[in-house]
Amino acid sequence: MTLEEFYVRQLRLLDDGAVEEWADTFTAGAVFTQHAPAGRTFAGGAPAVRSGRVAIAAALRAAVAKRAGSRVTRRYWLGMLRADGAGRTRWLAFNIETPVGGRPVLHNSTGGEDLLVPAGDSWRVHRRTVVHDAAAPPTAG
Amino acid sequence: MTLEEFYVRQLRLLDDGAVEEWADTFTAGAVFTQHAPAGRTFAGGAPAVRSGRVAIAAALRAAVAKRAGSRVTRRYWLGMLRADGAGRTRWLAFNIETPVGGRPVLHNSTGGEDLLVPAGDSWRVHRRTVVHDAAAPPTAG
Amino acid sequence: MTLEEFYVRQLRLLDDGAVEEWADTFTAGAVFTQHAPAGRTFAGGAPAVRSGRVAIAAALRAAVAKRAGSRVTRRYWLGMLRADGAGRTRWLAFNIETPVGGRPVLHNSTGGEDLLVPAGDSWRVHRRTVVHDAAAPPTAG
């Protein structure tokens, strides 16, 4: 599986709200950190740090529950991917939200850095750091 | 030609309103279906199904005629592509519309599944199923 | 370095406002032209043409200075890339601007054509022609 394929699969699981399968794309000890852009802080004052696959899954499960019944379709796009050959990647991502009968709008714009480790013929994320351009508090895993 | 190259070529033909060349990227017996998201229906009540290259071309020709003189530039993006090695693909797409002197806006957000068949050193689409996130009636081929 | 990697690197330098490194992705004699769509003209009446890396760098430096302190994060996306094997490429690009605490919005939608020349294990742009869909005067390099 190429890196591109790994990310497409991971993000489509996020689109689908497939919490357990998505969480399984992280290592058991993964650390997922979400920051405001440099020089800013999230409303809560600190980066959101989730340590371990269990905490990462719980955050997404809460976000999925919150969106249940919202009748908004969300699609994640990831691109502008760079890799150093040793599992370190940089990428950009955004998602598009479309309400029933409405116009699609951009919901988040982010830049991320991952440390991936091999897992069979694929990878898992061991460390993910995401900068949220809006510097609004993160609401999803 | 890689799958990515096939899709870039096909979508740029759509940008350009090149109806005949675009239609030639489908097989003569291709079926093109556009759905609302699961649990919803298009305003017209049913999926839009176009059977055969002639019908597929006619739908785009009508859409191009309708947009003629609109002074809006439309750009299709396709990404998040997955392929199973047997001609089945999944992808996301959106298009950006920009009026003269105005801001670009997202016009459609969709997810698609294709069955491709080999055609020389490229492919043709034999079956395409597209989900329109907005669940508005499709207006273009 | 693949073409995709070249473009990701070049555009991330633009995101970062890294003027000198970005300018070094052009040849010394590069020509960078920005057009309105066919049949239209920029407000200024003529295409913006910058000849030579020095002029190209100066235009970006001015744009970066103008945005300094704007508290808006800008992210460039490039995709739908085609190459002919002889250094000629075609692509689409847009950028997303996100103000602090605000929603991300599309800022520009463009289509470009490059002539690239080999440079070590990478490339430099020798000729770039960009069509700005909005037909507004270009403000950045």
Image: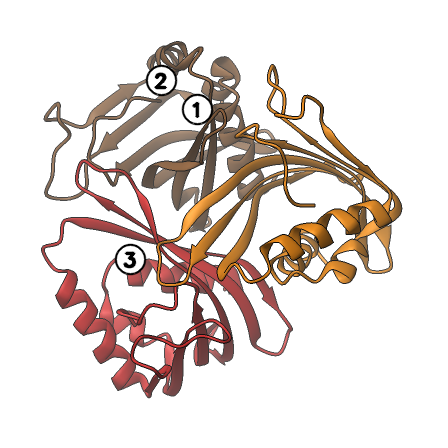
Chain colours: A orange, B red, C brown
Residue assigned mark 2? C56
- Residue C66 x, y percent position in the rendering: 36, 11
Q: CA distance from mark 3 to mark 2?
A: 29 Å
Question: Which chain's residue wears label 1?
Answer: C
Q: CA distance from mark 1 to mark 2?
A: 8 Å
Q: Tell me what residue is drawn at x 31 percent, y 84 percent.
A: B53
Label 1: state its secondary structure. Answer: strand
Marks 1 & 3 on one chain:
no
Residue C49 lies left or right of residue B84; in this view the side is left
- Residue C96 x, y percent position in the rendering: 43, 35
- Type of amino acid at the residue the image marks with label 2: Ile
- Residue A46 x, y percent position in the rendering: 71, 23
Q: Tell me what residue is drawn at x 45 percent, y 41 percent.
A: C78
Dot label at residue A9 = none
Residue A105 lies left or right of residue C46; in this view the side is right
- Residue A12 x, y percent position in the rendering: 62, 60
Quadrant of residue C43 in the image?
top left
Label 3: state its secondary structure. Answer: helix
Q: Is residue B36 above or below residue C45?
A: below
Q: Quadrant of the C terminus of chain B?
A: bottom left
First in sequence: mark 1 or mark 2? 1
Residue assigned mark 3? B15
Marks 1 & 2 on one chain:
yes
Label 2: state its secondary structure. Answer: helix
Estimate how packed mark 3 is, as few (under 14), some (14 to 19) or many (20 or more) residues with alpha carbons within 10 Å. Answer: some
For the residue pair C54 and A49, the one nearer the viewer reads as A49
Asked whether disc 3 touches disc 2, contact meaning CB atoms under 8 Å apart, the reply is no
Q: Is residue B102 above or below residue A28?
A: above
Q: Is residue A85 above or below residue A3?
A: above
Residue assigned mark 1? C26
